[in-house]
Image (spheres, helix red, strand yellow):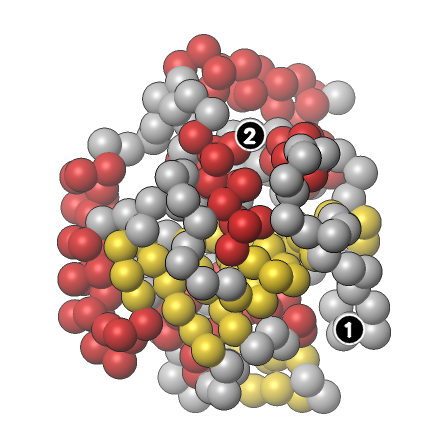
């Protein structure tokens, strides 16, 4: 009950403020400083510190991966799409890691700022031709990809209903899967997605909303069809409150 009250208060606060978390033109400075802090406690780029055992990922990173990133990689690996696209790729570490985990698939990404991509090119030059500047709140990405994902992106979009436009454009850009790893108190993602799915020109034939709980974190997986015969446990989601378990 306490979590539910806090959750409702957070949603109310977000609506009243209606302001994005960052001034985006200056965001690259916040981002690079955040990476410096994170790399003290977490491995940001994989080397040979992982393996696949019967198709499942096992990590041996020291320091460990961030728990959000670890679950994201495990789900993407489990779904094993032919193409992946990251919205808000920042410094490119997720793209870099997923290319190591799934070396034979097409990987692309976009970010709102060229300065972020300049940072990515310095950090991982091999990704230079795999990214471009794009604003997902305005238009879908130019091509279709089997799987799109976000990692702490939509949560920061608070102004007006821009996050709804971003979610709509995710569906317009993906053929099979969308993975969201977000702060679930920032929007009612479940209800927003259900609302979008009822619109006249919703591009998917079906919508299945799942959660995957690894005992440390929960991730949301959207699919155009039922997910079956996978290594991970995909449980159909009934409400956004279910995502608050590890709040």
Could you tell me residue 75's position as x and y percent?
Answer: 63, 66
Could you tell me residue 126's position as x and y percent?
Answer: 26, 80
Seen at 52% across and 73% down, the residue is: 83
Question: Residue at the front extreme?
Answer: 201
Seen at 40% across and 58% down, the residue is: 142
* Quarter the C terminus occupies: top right
Residue highlighted by disc 1: 230
In depth, the one of 126 and 8 nearer the eye is: 126
- Viewer can see residue 211: no
- Viewer can see residue 226: yes
Looking at the image, residue 53 lies above or below residue 10: below
Residue at disc 1, secondary structure: loop
* Quarter the N terminus occupies: top right
Q: Is residue 168 left or right of residue 212?
A: left
In depth, the one of 232 and 144 nearer the eye is: 144
Residue highlighted by disc 2: 187
Seen at 28% across and 61% down, the residue is: 132
Residue at disc 2, secondary structure: loop
Q: Quadrant of residue 213?
A: bottom right
Q: Quadrant of residue 78?
A: bottom right
């Amino acid at each position: 009950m306490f979590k539910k009250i806090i959750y409702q208060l957070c949603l109310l606060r977000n609506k009243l403020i209606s302001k994005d978390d960052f001034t985006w033109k200056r965001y690259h400075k916040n981002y690079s400083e955040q990476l410096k802090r994170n790399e003290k406690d977490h491995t940001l780029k994989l080397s040979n510190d992982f393996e696949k055992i019967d198709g499942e990922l096992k990590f041996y990173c020291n320091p460990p991966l961030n728990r959000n990133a670890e679950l994201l990689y495990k789900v993407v690996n489990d779904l094993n799409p032919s193409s992946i696209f990251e919205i808000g790729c920042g410094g490119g570490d997720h793209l870099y890691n997923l290319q190591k985990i799934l070396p034979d698939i097409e990987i692309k990404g976009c970010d709102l700022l060229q300065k972020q991509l300049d940072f990515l090119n310095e950090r991982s030059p091999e990704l230079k031709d795999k990214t471009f500047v794009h604003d997902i709140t305005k238009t879908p990405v130019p091509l279709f990809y089997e799987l799109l994902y976000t990692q702490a992106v939509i949560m920061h979009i608070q102004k007006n209903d821009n996050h709804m436009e971003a979610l709509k454009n995710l569906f317009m850009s993906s053929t099979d899967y969308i993975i969201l790893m977000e702060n679930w108190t920032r929007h009612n993602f479940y209800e927003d997605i259900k609302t979008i799915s009822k619109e006249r020109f919703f591009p998917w034939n079906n919508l299945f909303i799942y959660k995957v709980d690894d005992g440390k974190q929960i991730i949301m997986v959207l699919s155009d069809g039922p997910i079956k015969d996978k290594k991970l446990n995909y449980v159909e989601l009934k409400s956004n409150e279910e995502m608050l378990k590890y709040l």
